[in-house]
Image (spheres, rainbow, N blue to C red):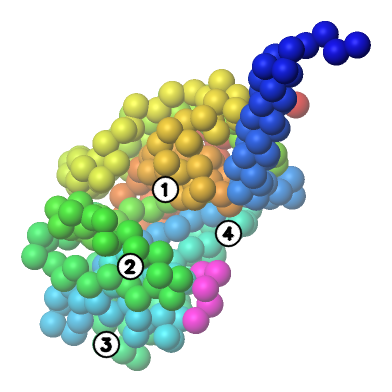
Amino acid sequence: MNLWSNDEYFFVQLAASHKQKKGEAMEKFMSRFNFRRECCLAVGVERESFLTDKEGKIAPLAPMVLNFLTDRERFGYELSACQLEDRIGPCNLHEVRSELMKNERDILEAERMFQFKRIHMEVAPEDMPLDIYPDPTGRYQEIVKKLPRNILLAACRVTGTHVHIGMPNHHVALKVYNQVISQLDYLCTEGDGSSGRRLAIYKTMAPEQDLCPYGSWSDFHRQAVEKNFVDDPRRCWNLIRISVHGTIEFRMFGVTDNLDRIVSWAKICHNLCKVAMRGCH
């Protein structure tokens, strides 16, 4: 005997369908994050710099430079064609300096060959070129179509150093993130090399930096939907974020040619995550 009316049955089925779709959307979101147990507490570093021509002027030289530096695991492009990114990792903490030196040697060879230099400057002049890197995926071209000029200028004028610390799984990543965000102000001060100018400009693009803990991955997913990064978590511009690379990413540090300073930033982030992981199961 059917104890439900047709209307009641319809709404029960509708609720079940909605719950299933919500679960599928959540599963798809979580699958975007590539956690690897073997990379737990491994370190990665992304380091940006401006490129200058032989007259010392910032210039859109990245396409030329990256035609020479072809290892895309170690060298890449940014939105601005005037910037170069070099990266290391995942590696052990004690290997960070030697891995940075390996990149340094290859870039110095390119500098000699093509007569350009890097500047480790956190904020470029307002009259710098605004050439966009010809991203083969078309992603940057689409981004730029929607950007007002002042936001584009802000995006191109600043460079930084990002430190990644590997997480073994979703559960631990959330727990660690919720703990380390309390250190945001300290980390911003530690990484500042421009008396706050770089982060002030960055916040014109990403003003919401009042980081709050996520109650669960469901809560994280809900916020990703609300803030429009659910389909591409790289569009989460938080200064600390859970990264698609399966890491906690610290994005507040400035730039420097002092490798020991970069190593010290990596050590701080590594220690914060290691302490936060205690008690995680």
**Percent of width and height locating residue 207:** 27, 36
Q: Residue furthest top?
A: 3
Where 135 sits versus 208, above or below?
Answer: below
Q: CA distance from mark 4 to mark 3?
A: 28 Å
Q: Nearer the viewer, mark 4 or mark 2?
A: 2
Amino acid at dot 4: Gly
> Residue 235: which numbered mark, if any?
1
Q: Along the polypeptide, which appears first: circle 1 or circle 2?
A: 2
Q: Secondary structure at mark 1?
A: helix
Amino acid at dot 1: Arg
Where 109 sits versus 162, above or below?
Answer: below
Amino acid at dot 2: Gln
- Residue 71: say if magenta: yes
Assign the magenta stretch its main secondary structure.
loop
Judging by the rendered image, the residue that carries numbered circle 3 is 115
Q: CA distance from mark 4 to mark 1?
A: 22 Å
Quick one: label 4, few (<14), some, or many (20+) residues within 10 Å?
many
Q: Secondary structure at mark 3?
A: loop
**What segment carries the magenta color?**
70-74
**Percent of width and height locating residue 48:** 35, 61
The reply to whether the C-beta atoms of the residues labelled 1 and 2 are less than 8 Å apart is: no
Judging by the rendered image, the residue that carries numbered circle 4 is 89
**Percent of width and height locating residue 12:** 71, 19
Q: Residue furthest bottom?
A: 113
Q: In this image, 54 relative to 233: left or right?
A: left
Judging by the rendered image, the residue that carries numbered circle 2 is 141
Q: Nearer the viewer, mark 1 or mark 2?
A: 2
- Residue 93: say if magenta: no
Is 101 in front, or is 26? 26
Q: In this image, 224 relative to 253: left or right?
A: right
Q: CA distance from mark 2 to mark 3?
A: 28 Å
Is 234 in front, or is 98? 234
